[in-house]
Image: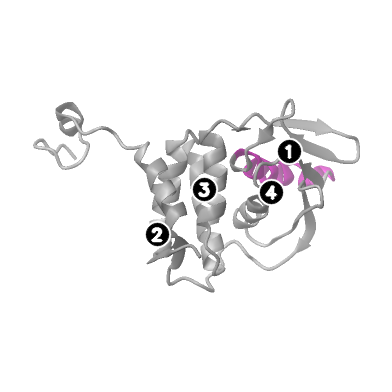
Amino acid sequence: MSSKRGPLSLSEISFYVTRAAVGVGVPWGLAEDLARTAVYIARGGVDPSPLIVDALSRLDSQTSQSQLVFEDHGDSTELTTEGSGMLSVIFAAPAARDWMIEQHNSGKCDLSVTQLDVPDLAVSIVRALTPGTRRWSVGKSADDSIKVSLSKEQGADVSNITGHSGGALVDSSAWCIIQTYFAKCLVASTTESRLGGAGAGVNDND
């Protein structure tokens, strides 16, 4: 049985996950989306660290890629990637959510996301990024593809679940990996970096 660490505050989870994602090359905006998802999962009483580490590790090892390809199949659209490689959920899920919002008024309300590396995380990302009271349908199919649809009906706002806000216990091994990725985004401590404003150097120019 794996050991647990914490409880960690939701702010701490957000802080480290954002910077861990940046450490493996994720753009800042998408890193914030991933952190928001980690907080969303933690608020539901579930440890987000294993799924987060799975997605980050696939990017870090370059076994997953960020290139997105939208294929129009007439009555439906598929989001995938080129070749037989795996598509990073960190890039694909926010893109799926954005596409659905942009296409909503055109009547194209069905999107299939295939070749995903971590399908289970995709569902949480789309739901965590749900704006306001739009009614979403997000689910994983038997082939591990993700089906996303957006109804014109209004539903409950699930973007700010607050049922478990006191912090979360996380898997110790997974959290150590997150901290390792976090360290990749840190600037090396040198005289020049301190004089330039990193940390509390001898010349504090904030």
10 Å crowding of disc 4: few (<14), some (14-19), many (20+): many
Report the residue at 20% width, 35% height from top: 197
Q: Which colour scheme is used?
A: one colour
Q: Classify residue 12 as left or right of residue 21.
A: left
Circle on res. 11: 2
- Type of the residue with mark 3: Val
Distance from disc 3 to disc 4, alpha carbons, whole Å, reads 14 Å
Distance from disc 1 to disc 2, alpha carbons, whole Å, reads 32 Å
Question: For this rendering, which residue is in front, 117 or 150?
Answer: 117
Q: Where is residue 40 in the image (x, y as percent from the top left)?
A: 55, 61
Distance from disc 3 to disc 1, alpha carbons, whole Å, reads 18 Å
Question: For this rendering, which residue is in front, 47 or 137?
Answer: 47
Q: Position of residue 47 (x, y in %)?
A: 52, 62
Query: Mark 2 or mark 3, which is nearer to you?
Result: 3
Circle on res. 119: 4
Magenta stretch contains residue 92: yes
As helix, strand or loop, the secondary structure at mark 1 comes to loop
Which mark sits nearer the N-terminus, 3 or 4? 3
Q: Point out the stretch of residues depicted in magenta.
A: 91-107
Discs 4, 2 touching: Cβ within 8 Å: no
Query: Mark 4 or mark 2, which is nearer to you?
Result: 4
Circle on res. 53: 3
10 Å crowding of disc 2: few (<14), some (14-19), many (20+): few
